[in-house]
């Protein structure tokens, strides 16, 4: 039995270093299985900011991409799918220098299909099996303003490198996909001021291979506030997709002959949001991601027996993102997922025999790299809003360390984290950043405030017209609840978040000035009026939908924007405020941090601005993470520990 040392919270030594968080939490995405060769590929960050194409071999995973290449694009600023397999087994990908390239899987030779352009961006590829045509989203920045940027679905001729626009007219496109026989295609589209997750239309059309043209377009679902997503063709020509009905995203099937989509409705699935899917055993089984209460599962639906079951239970999967499933054979698939103690990992999942399911690869550092008893395990908490009479949710990690404990009766400081989006979610999967703090003696709470996904469409839509109010109430209510419940130290609660979470942080400090001992705002919005005028195309109408209640007179809109902007209430900020912002941020420009910094400073407040050169919105480069985390920890020691 290990005797733990008694040390105050926040002063515990931990093997989880800043370097581990910066380079150890590597991305692992986009599993791909080549139908021709059976070879398995995926994308993985290498800890330096580069994204490699990896192949899983009998000797382990190897990087098959030349070092001068790095996969990625900035379509819609956030990026879209960057990797796909061509019918002959080669791989087409977006390179971060804005080129489109092809990697020969046998020789590792790379050829450029489309040269770099300061104007055009490409991503989300789908290949036609019987010709040289590949479809992709094309983004044209000739007029580089939110209203001037144009998006298309373009057909790229791999034999010549020529790109022809074949679908146009909508403001946005997503997930173009050829049918297995190459005669049809499907895509999502939507227009301003709508958002993908609410008003996307699911469109299908015939493909004229000879003329590289789209014919007989029709809308088969969506466009009615019942969000559609994740279209997938079956081998028989049936189309599977997800659509909201009854408050949750459910699976639908459109027969090969057309007609009306059919709801795949089995008892027990009604309370899940169903998303990414893959067909196995000649379309008998559907392997589907399913989310409920911000916890993801992998389920298998038997379309013949009309039953379903959870699979991969031994792996305890809890977070499955987009583009995370790829079929290996008729009974198994590769899946990218995480759980409470494992970071981004690649699994082989067998739908019939759990003993055949296994972990194939873990990206970077994971739970097994640390001593037993070090990692904190999450607790899902539901509380009632004190002002709005509804529930709100969060994941709480209490302090834990295999070598240290605080004096009996001493309560820990609490860091509250508000996620971005705001239409996002935080799951109970491993976060090295959270464990960095819990292993040092802090409690850490991820709040899934009103507007988050993972709890049904009503909860997600509740934030419309209430952004900056309801989400702010939620973080303050959690702070009060955990203090009153005797779980954390009074006067030692901090608030932080990035992007929309940074906006939440500033709102919390202005609306609840005595609740939080300190705040750390990363890439947050301080002035909504200026943000609306200078943000990127994808979200240029997003703020209005979130801020303005339906039916609001035009004259009241500016008033609401000012009421919900920390810039106009900065005199209320009493707590020390740290601002961290990327200078190259195109989503929330760095001027947003400079505005609030200067006002608080002029008012005599305790404020610090850290600008990160050559960094965009996500603050994800390893050097940026190192700087950000070091500054944040120092701020919490100053404000929560009073050191």
Image (cartoon, rainbow, N blue to C red):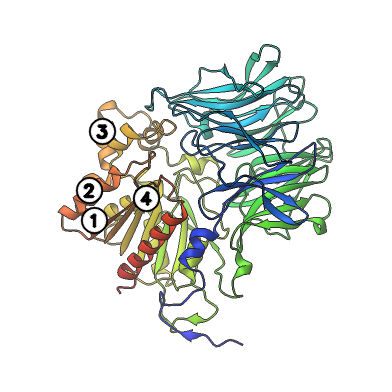
What is the x, y in percent for residue 72?
54, 40
Q: Is residue 248 left or right of residue 508?
A: right
- Kind of element beneath mark 2: helix
Label 4 or label 2, whichever comes before in sequence order = 4
Q: Using the numbered discs, state the Cα–Cα distance from disc 4 to disc 2 in whole angstroms.
A: 16 Å
- Residue 69 against residue 132 in the figure, above or below: below
Q: Nearer the viewer, mark 4 or mark 2?
A: 4
Q: Residues within 10 Å of mark 4 (few under 14, many from 20)?
A: many
Q: Which residue is mark 4?
A: 502
User: Of 582 and 575, which appears nearest the observer?
Assistant: 582
Q: Secondary structure at mark 4?
A: helix
Closest to the observer, 178 or 530: 178
Q: Is residue 460 left or right of residue 516?
A: right
Which quadrant, please, contains the C terminus?
bottom left
Assess whether mark 2 and mark 4 are in contact (beta carbons under 8 angstroms).
no
Q: Position of residue 93 (x, y in %)?
A: 61, 36
Pointer 2 or 3: first along the chain: 3
Q: Inspect this view and state whether residue 228 appears.
A: no
Which of these two is toward me, 589 or 272? 589
* Distance CA(mark 4)–CA(mark 3): 21 Å
| Label 3 residue SS | helix
Q: Is 9 placed left or right of 377 in the picture? A: left
Q: Earlier in the sequence, mark 3 or mark 1?
A: 3
Total numbered circles: 4
Mark 4 or mark 1, which has the lower sequence index? 4
Q: Which residue is mark 2?
A: 569
Spatial CA distance of label 4 from label 1 is 15 Å
Residue appearing at x 35%, y 46% in the figure: 469
C-alpha separation, residue under disc 3 versus residue under disc 1: 22 Å
Q: What is the number of the mark on residue 558?
A: 3
């Amino acid at each position: 039995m290990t005797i733990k040392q008694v040390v105050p919270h926040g002063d515990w030594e931990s093997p989880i270093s800043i370097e581990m968080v910066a380079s150890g939490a590597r991305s692992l995405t986009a599993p791909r299985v080549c139908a021709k060769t059976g070879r398995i590929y995926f994308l993985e960050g290498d800890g330096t900011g580069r994204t490699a194409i990896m192949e899983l071999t009998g000797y382990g995973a190897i990087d098959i991409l030349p070092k001068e290449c790095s996969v990625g694009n900035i379509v819609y600023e956030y990026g879209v799918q960057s990797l796909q397999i061509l019918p002959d087994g080669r791989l087409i990908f977006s390179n971060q220098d804005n080129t489109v390239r092809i990697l020969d899987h046998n020789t590792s030779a790379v050829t450029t299909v489309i040269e770099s352009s300061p104007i055009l961006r490409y991503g989300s590829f789908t290949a036609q099996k019987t010709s040289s045509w590949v479809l992709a989203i094309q983004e044209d920045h000739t007029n580089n303003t939110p209203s001037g940027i144009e998006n298309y679905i373009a057909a790229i001729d791999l034999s010549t490198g020529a790109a022809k626009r074949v679908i146009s007219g909508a403001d946005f496109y997503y997930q173009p996909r050829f049918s297995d026989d190459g005669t049809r295609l499907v895509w999502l589209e939507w227009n301003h001021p709508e958002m993908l997750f609410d008003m996307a239309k699911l469109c299908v059309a015939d493909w004229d291979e000879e003329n590289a043209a789209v014919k007989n377009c029709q809308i088969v679902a969506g466009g009615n506030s019942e969000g559609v997503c994740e279209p997938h063709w079956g081998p028989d020509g049936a189309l599977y997709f997800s659509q909201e009905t009854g408050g949750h995203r459910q699976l639908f099937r459109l027969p090969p002959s057309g007609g009306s989509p059919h709801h795949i409705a089995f008892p027990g699935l009604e309370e899940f949001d169903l998303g990414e899917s893959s067909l196995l055993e000649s379309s008998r089984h559907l392997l589907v991601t399913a989310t409920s209460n911000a916890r993801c599962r992998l389920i298998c639906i038997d379309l013949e027996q009309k039953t379903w079951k959870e699979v991969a239970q031994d792996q305890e999967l809890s977070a499955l993102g987009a583009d995370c499933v790829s079929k290996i054979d008729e009974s198994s698939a590769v899946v990218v997922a995480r759980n409470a103690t494992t970071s981004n990992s690649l699994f082989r999942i067998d739908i019939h025999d759990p003993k055949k399911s296994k972990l194939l690869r873990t990206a970077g550092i994971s739970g097994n790299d640390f001593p037993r008893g070090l990692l904190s395990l999450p607790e899902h908490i539901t509380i009632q809003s004190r002002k709005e009479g509804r529930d709100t949710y969060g994941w709480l990690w209490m302090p834990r360390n295999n070598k240290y404990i605080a004096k009996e009766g001493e309560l820990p400081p609490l860091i509250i984290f508000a996620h971005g989006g705001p239409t996002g979610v935080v799951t109970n999967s491993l976060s090295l950043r959270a464990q960095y703090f819990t292993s040092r003696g802090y409690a850490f709470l991820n709040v899934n405030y009103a507007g988050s996904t993972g709890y049904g469409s009503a909860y997600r839509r509740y934030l419309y017209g209430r952004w900056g109010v309801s989400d702010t109430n939620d973080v303050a209510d959690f702070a009060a609840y955990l203090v009153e419940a005797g779980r954390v130290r009074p006067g030692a609660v901090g608030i932080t978040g990035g992007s929309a979470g940074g906006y939440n942080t500033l709102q919390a400090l202005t609306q609840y000035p005595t609740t939080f001992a300190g705040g750390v705002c990363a890439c947050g919005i301080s002035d909504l009026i200026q943000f609306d005028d200078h943000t990127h195309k994808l979200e240029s109408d997003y703020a209005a939908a979130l801020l303005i209640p339906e039916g609001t007179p035009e004259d009241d809109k500016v008033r609401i924007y000012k009421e919900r902007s920390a810039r106009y209430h900065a005199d209320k900020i009493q707590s020390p405020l740290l601002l961290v912002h990327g200078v190259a941020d195109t989503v929330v420009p760095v001027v947003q941090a400079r505005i609030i910094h200067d006002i608080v400073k002029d008012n005599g407040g305790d404020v610090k601005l850290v600008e990160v050169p050559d960094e965009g919105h996500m603050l994800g480069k390893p050097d940026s993470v190192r700087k950000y985390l070091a500054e944040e920890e120092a701020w919490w020691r100053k404000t929560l520990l009073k050191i």
